[in-house]
Amino acid sequence: MTDPSSPASSPVWHPFTQHALQPKMQRISRGLGAWLKTDDERLIIDAISSWWVITHGHCHPRIVAAIRDQAERLDQVIFAGFSHEPAETLAHKLLEIVPDGLDRVFYSDSGSTAVEVALKMALGYWRNTGQPRTRILALEHAYHGDTVGTMSAGARGVFNAAYEPLLFDVERLPFPSPGDEQATLDALEAACREQNCAALIVEPLVLGAGGMLVWSADCLREMRAICDKYDVLLIADEVMTGWARTGTMFACEQAGVTPDILCSAKGLTAGHLPLAVTLCSERIYQAHYSEDRSKTFFHSSSFTANPISCAAALANIELWEDQPVLERVGDLVGWQSAALAKFEGDERFANIRQSGTIAALDLVVPDAGYLAEAGLALQAFFLDCGILLRPLGNTIYVMPPYCITSEQLDQIYAAIAEAPEIVGAGSR
Ligand SMILES: *Cc1c(COP(=O)(O)O)cnc(C)c1O
């Protein structure tokens, strides 16, 4: 008799998972604060905020209560021709939080769709204003999602090789490595002179899936200036960086810039439910505002502005308003710095870096492909230590929920200190 709960008999196909190499999925039955609990009652510290979504902590009682309350009143309603209070209140609240100059809020349901919407808004803007601009500029190592449009804007590699022939071409700018930003700015300016540029899309200050690559706010400010000079739209993909991951509510704030379009998802509902927004300036909205139907913004998802998700996002913003969350973030930033400082001079690690609450360091390994093999062993080791960490290649990063304690963080870094031994790294 087959056990229906045994992984071997599960019909579930997991994301970014090679089932032939990883036959067993760890089952989780509860989440609370920074903890996850396995179905065999073991506690695990969620050191990556469940893939960068959880901000305050798992199952926050105020967000859970808002979800429960909204679910009893209105579950879902078509959002074309209809509206509802949670979506409208949330839109107003969001405009109070984001950089000045963003005026309109378009709802969708994931980071990828928020970016697709951003790209479509930019292209629609140029079409509707009678200028044939279609070229998208993007950074080397960028990640913007896994749909065909967002993969096109993202870096090419093993993850999208199969689809490469169908991806659209973008102008790729070199990553602005600290100290070497001028090459990026020169490439941006050269590209902008070509006339056909519709928009530049960036992950402000930190490229997430590309390996937690940190870059400067000054460079972002200069990019904004070049975009202004050539009238190229700037899209900020803040799907990961938003909601204070980089220390400020949105990463753009540190550069003092307002993008023409800003994408937010992940932490929007504190990571409790799927919801995304694409905010844009009035000028982009006005380019679509017309009695000419052909200028309509033709985009929708079935669950656009789902009322329960909107209620969760509203409860999230209320927490930011009436609890000292930014202070907690500030503490976490300090703890992360202190933890990283202990790795300075340790030859088994390189490229120690931090942006706000995000800390990252690279394992020194014999060759780059090496950790592709060792990665699973490393994840299993961390799990045995009671910690959820998921290195990106040889990059180990810690992006915890803001409720994490300094003791829990100590536990995470104690495990990281043992990681080189587990994979035989540091010995060339
Ligand atoms: C996660 C992520 C996305 C995609 O978001 P999903 O909700 O997973 O579709 C897009 N952009 C960035 C920068 C991300 O980190």
Image (spheres, rainbow, N blue to C red):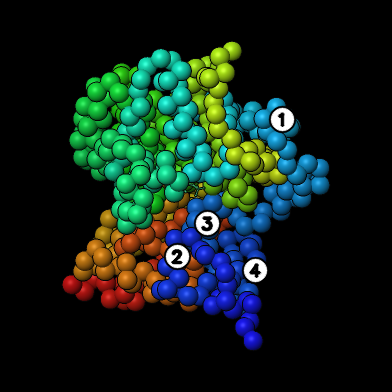
Q: What crowding class fits label 4: few (fewer than 14 Cα within 10 Å), some (14-19), or many (20 or more)?
A: few
Nearest to N terminus: mark 1 or mark 4: 4
Q: Which residue is mark 2?
A: 17
* Horizontal side, residue 175 vs residue 42: left or right: left
C-alpha span from label 3 to label 2: 19 Å
The amino acid pointed to by label 2 is Thr
Residue furthest to the left: 428
Q: In this rendering, is residue 154 above or below 418?
A: above
Nearest to N terminus: mark 4 or mark 3: 4
- What is the number of the mark on residue 49? 3
Nearest to N terminus: mark 3 or mark 2: 2
Q: Which sits in the foreground, 221 or 122?
A: 122
C-alpha span from label 4 to label 2: 20 Å
* Horizontal side, residue 66 vs residue 296: left or right: right
User: Quadrant of residue 180 in the image?
Assistant: top left
Element type where label 4 sits in the image: strand
Q: Which residue is mark 1?
A: 83
Label 4 or label 2, whichever lies nearer to me, is 2
